[in-house]
């Protein structure tokens, strides 16, 4: 498991023992987002210092320093094959990078405000990006063209995630809702209401359940077809920052903000 935060460090943890395995320090400002590559060998971190760093998980050494954004980096995501890294930024663009060489690829341009979150579809052919004014863009990766813009959210989109078959997208927003969408048409399918800002979302591997976490320290589990609330999970002391299902779908992990 990995964590990053306002102390400018990336930390790797043993999930079973909760023991810290490695502490990595190199960013000059707060770390906003961290993610493992699909093969688990590389870690990417995006920071308020406007850079992205690629790290060797085993050694903790910096493999690449990716520079080009002119405003803080808000999110990063690997393509399913691990060859491309996407990054959202306050400069209103989605950056694209060749992971092997570190070369900057043509960015995705079309958002009118900062890009807050990015995610690849399971087949890597579509990328979703959310913005600070509530819009979500869907991009065709082979061409770099925008294929849809979703405008239903009333505020900042905090997070987006695809279902395992790539047909559905779920998004969470500061407007207090998580929403499910048809990826092909962009049509709204479900509106899942929270009492607080929704900070994180995830589909279960079988696509039948949506997990959403909020600023009110609560995780909710929903039926992904009907929108029925299945369960409410409480116990966090601070707002939720991330949720993730285990590969078999039997376990849900959730993370909270612990920095002051």
Image (cartoon, rainbow, N blue to C red):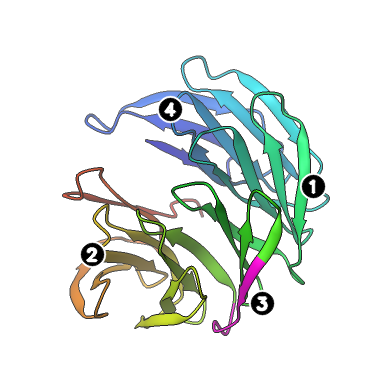
Residue in the foreground of this view, choosing between 165 and 47 = 165
Q: Which is more N-terminal, label 2 or label 3?
A: 3
Check whether the beta carbons of the residues at disc 4 and disc 2 lie within 8 A of each other: no
Q: Which is more N-terminal, label 4 or label 1?
A: 4
Residue in the foreground of this view, choosing between 81 and 36 = 81
213 shown above or below 19: below
Res 200 visible:
yes
Classed neighbour count for the residue bearing mark 2: other residues with Cα under 10 Å, few (<14), some (14–19), many (≥20): few
- Residue at left 76%, top 40%? 105
Q: Which mark is residue 69?
A: 1
| Of the two numbered discs 2 and 1 in the rendering, the one whose residue sits closer to the viewer | 2
Q: Which is more N-terminal, label 1 or label 2?
A: 1
| Distance between the alpha carbons at the discs numbered 2 and 1 | 37 Å
Q: Which mark is residue 87?
A: none
| Of the two numbered discs 4 and 3 in the rendering, the one whose residue sits closer to the viewer | 4
Looking at the picture, how far across and down is residue 119, in whole percent?
53, 54
The residue carrying mark 2 is: 208
| Distance between the alpha carbons at the discs numbered 1 and 3 | 20 Å
The residue carrying mark 4 is: 39
Location of residue 233 (image quadrant) = bottom left
Magenta segment includes 163: no
Residues in magenta?
147-155
- Residue at left 22%, top 31%? 16
| Distance between the alpha carbons at the discs numbered 3 and 2 | 29 Å
| Of the two numbered discs 1 and 4 in the rendering, the one whose residue sits closer to the viewer | 4
Looking at the picture, how far across and down is residue 132, in whole percent?
66, 71
The residue carrying mark 3 is: 133
Check whether the beta carbons of the residues at disc 1 and disc 4 lie within 8 A of each other: no
236 shown above or below 78: below
Q: Which is more N-terminal, label 3 or label 1?
A: 1
């Amino acid at each position: 498991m990995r964590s990053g935060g306002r102390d400018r460090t990336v930390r790797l943890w043993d999930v079973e023992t909760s023991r810290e395995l490695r502490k990595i320090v190199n960013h000059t400002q707060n770390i906003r987002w961290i993610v493992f590559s699909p093969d688990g060998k590389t870690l990417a971190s995006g920071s308020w210092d406007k850079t992205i760093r690629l790290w060797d998980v085993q050694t903790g050494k910096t493999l690449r320093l990716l520079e080009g954004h002119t405003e803080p980096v808000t999110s990063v995501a690997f393509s399913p094959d691990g060859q491309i890294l996407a990054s959202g930024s306050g400069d209103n663009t989605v950056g694209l990078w060749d992971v092997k060489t570190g070369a900057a690829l043509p960015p995705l341009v079309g958002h009118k405000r900062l890009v807050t979150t990015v995610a690849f579809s399971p087949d890597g052919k579509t990328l979703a990006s959310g913005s600070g004014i509530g819009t979500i863009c869907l991009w065709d990766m082979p061409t770099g063209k925008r294929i849809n813009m979703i405008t239903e959210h009333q505020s900042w989109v905090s997070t987006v995630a695809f279902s395992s078959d790539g047909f559905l997208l779920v998004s969470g927003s500061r407007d207090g809702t998580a929403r499910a969408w048809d990826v092909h048409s962009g049509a709204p399918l479900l509106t899942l209401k929270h009492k607080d800002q929704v900070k994180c979302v995830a589909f279960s591997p079988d696509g039948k359940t949506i997990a959403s976490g909020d600023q009110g320290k609560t995780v909710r589990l929903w039926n992904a077809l009907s929108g029925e609330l299945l369960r409410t999970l409480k116990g966090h002391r601070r707002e939720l920052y991330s949720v993730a299902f285990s590969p078999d779908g039997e376990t849900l992990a959730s993370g909270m903000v612990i920095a002051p």
